[in-house]
Amino acid sequence: MALSPHAAEDVVARRPAPDRLRRRVAELLASAGVRLDGTAPTDLRVRDPRFFTEVLSRGSLGLGETYMDGAWETDDLDGLLTRLMRARLHERVHGLDAWWTVARATLLNMQSRRRARRVGRVHYDLGNDLFRAMLGERMVYSCGYWARAATLDEAQEAKLDLIARKLELAPGMKVLDIGCGWGEALKFMAERYGVSGVGVTISKEQAALARELCRGLPVEIRLQDYRELDGRYDRVFSIGMFEHVGLRNYRRYFDTVRRCLAPDGLTLLHTIGSNVSVRATDPWIGRYIFPNSMLPSAAQITQAFEGLFVMEDWHGFGPDYDRTLQAWRANIERAWPSLPARYDERFRRMWRFYLAASMAVFRTRQAQLWQLVLSPDGVPGGYAAVR
């Protein structure tokens, strides 16, 4: 939830008693169809009264942290968060942390080479055991394509094949995967389409497992920042990495792709997108899940590649991410008892909040999933869109 500046001043100036705070929270929740201490699955039950101060003074950061600490419960976390987002309470309850996050992103390049590596250490290096348990047979940490799929593994394979077909892959091509994760896309394309490739990641854990998974294939995995890339490739693609590039670096990203792509090549960008142009991410997501991340808007993306590429295709299937996240949650919930003790109860609650909040964002269509196909100078005769 988020508090307007006027309401924030009211809270600070008047220093209301706890019962006033409780009434204010109850009113906000009621506007979203949620009862405080009610019995419906999406109602919110408070276990620690500090919840009221935290959520009103710190917005979404306070909401997420108090859930992690067990200060409140609900029987339907993603359903509750969907109601809060649909009522746009995040626009009514801002914490100072949100203002500070935006201010820093405005003044600094939060995704510089030095800062960009932090998300690798904080998130992607958490442990391959965690991601193996959650992601399924194919360790693909991005939205599946469910148009004709019935299971997560089918949806992820369908997504990888969709990308390969959009790129018009052919045997002997050399491809570049920017933000290759655990190497599953390159592995799939080398096995199914006969290509060779290079993948780059800033996560040591990802690089180590990717090399293992791609052993015996014409695939090279590098621990490298995208800004350090060179060479020439027939095709360049990026799946779920652009969310870490940052507004100040979008042009640099597309300059790099143009430099590395053959004149008659194609590039595909698979990214989560925002309906509005912003400079920073939600404070809770930025602190606990993806440091220094931000979602690009359509305007920011197109402005960044203007003069460098021709738009050939723009495909959106954001609702598929809700279903992907539900499958990840089912997998990780089954796996919790067998995971190492370092994933303690607070971590589990953090992870549950992350997945549920992500479901709510896509369910309310406040975030999208886009695949863009670009060419340096336009495909002669036109590009045939693939679905």
Image (spheres, grey):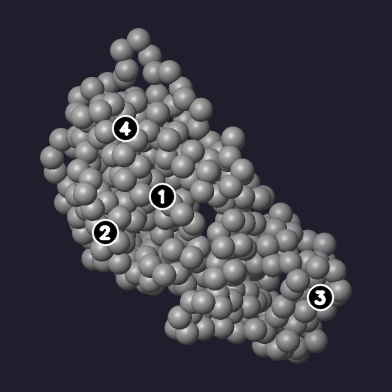
Q: Which residue is mark 2?
A: 212
Q: Is residue 254 visible?
A: no
Up the image or down, 161 lies above or below 5; here it is above
Q: Secondary structure at mark 4?
A: helix
Q: Nearer the viewer, residue 152 or 23?
A: 152
**Left or right: 24 with respect to 152?**
right
Task: Report the amino acid beneath label 2.
Answer: Glu
Q: Quadrant of residue 17?
A: bottom right
Q: Quadrant of the N terminus?
A: bottom right
Instruction: Give how far apart the Cα atoms at labels 3 and 2 are.
Output: 50 Å
Q: Which residue is mark 4?
A: 193
User: Which mark is drawn over residue 240?
Assistant: 1
Instruction: Give how far apart the Cα atoms at labels 4 and 2 are.
Output: 20 Å
Q: Earlier in the sequence, mark 3 or mark 2?
A: 3
Q: Within 10 Å of the Cα at label 2, are there few (<14), some (14-19), or many (20+) other Cα atoms?
A: few
Q: Quadrant of residue 116?
A: bottom left
> Do the numbered discs 1 and 4 sit on residues whose CB atoms are within 8 Å?
no
Instruction: Give how far apart the Cα atoms at labels 1 and 3 are.
Output: 37 Å
Q: Nearer the viewer, residue 260 or 278?
A: 260
Instruction: Give the residue drawn at x 58%, y 76%.
Output: 349
Which tag is nearer the camera, tag 3 or tag 2? 2
Task: Report the amino acid beneath label 1.
Answer: Gly
